[in-house]
Amino acid sequence: MNTSKNSTRARLSLTLALALGSLALSLSGCGYRAGGQGWTGSSETWPSTEFLPATLTLVDIRTGEELWTQDIPVGYQMVTHFIEGGGTDKVERPDRLEYTLFLNGTKYGKLRSAIAVPPAQCRRWELTYRDAPEYAQPGLRNGGLGNAPPWFELPAKPLPDLDTDSGDMYEKQ
């Protein structure tokens, strides 16, 4: 009888441990995050912030040619992913780079742009930083003007006339 309780308890412990382990793996390994997921073939994420405004360049190390470069706007992240064998030329550019700009912190999304690139042993990333601080361009804040608060517009409009003599911080009627 005691053996039956121990067996049930062991099965329950194993089930709980497997469930918690699966949850931890799924939470830590999913979605875009700075630097990528940490395994070969994963997506890489390159954020650009006010104090680290980034420029990303892909270089063909055989020729030194800059194949692709992107000034990543402040407040955005570039997500990249290489597809082995997805290129247009089996010798010079056998692989494909897929990429898209997202708002910083975006975890999921479709990579909508692509170019053919050299094989892995013939390419390298160069990440450089522009002069800081650099602030988000007004048209790019909040993902574009469409997501901006109703009071935000370009060019900036003057503040309403406030009755400050009486201490009343509401607009005059």
Image: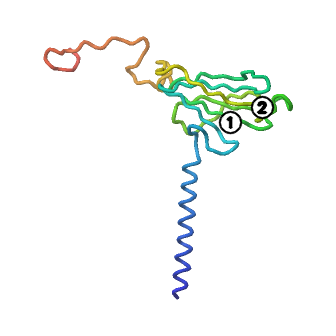
* Spot occupied by residue 154 in the image (x, y as percentages of width and height): 44, 13
Question: As shown in the figure, which amino acid type bears the numbered disc 2?
Answer: Cys
Residue 172 vs 143, above or below: the answer is above
Q: Is residue 166 left or right of residue 90?
A: left
Q: Residue 122: give its label.
A: 2
Q: Pointers 2 and 1 in contact (CB under 8 A)?
A: no
Q: Nearer the viewer, residue 99 or 148?
A: 99
Q: Residue at x 71, y 36 (%)?
A: 82
Residue at the outermost left position: 166
Q: Nearer the viewer, residue 127 or 70?
A: 127
Disc 2: CA contacts within 10 A as few (<14), some (14-19) or many (>=20): some
Q: Residue 170: give its label.
A: none
From the viewer's perspective, is the residue at label 2 or at label 1 nearer?
Answer: 2
Question: As shown in the figure, which amino acid type bears the numbered disc 1?
Answer: His
Residue 77 placement: quadrant: top right
* Spot occupied by residue 19 in the image (x, y as percentages of width and height): 55, 62
Q: Nearer the viewer, residue 24 or 8?
A: 24
What is the secondary structure assignment of the residue under circle 1? Answer: strand
Coloration of the structure image? rainbow
Q: Residue at x 81, y 32 (%)?
A: 94
Q: How many marks?
A: 2
Residue 136 vs 23, above or below: the answer is above
Q: Mark 1 — residue?
A: 81
Residue 18 placement: quadrant: bottom right
Residue 173 in sight in this render: no
Q: Is residue 68 left or right of residue 150?
A: right
* Spot occupied by residue 41 in the image (x, y as percentages of width and height): 70, 42
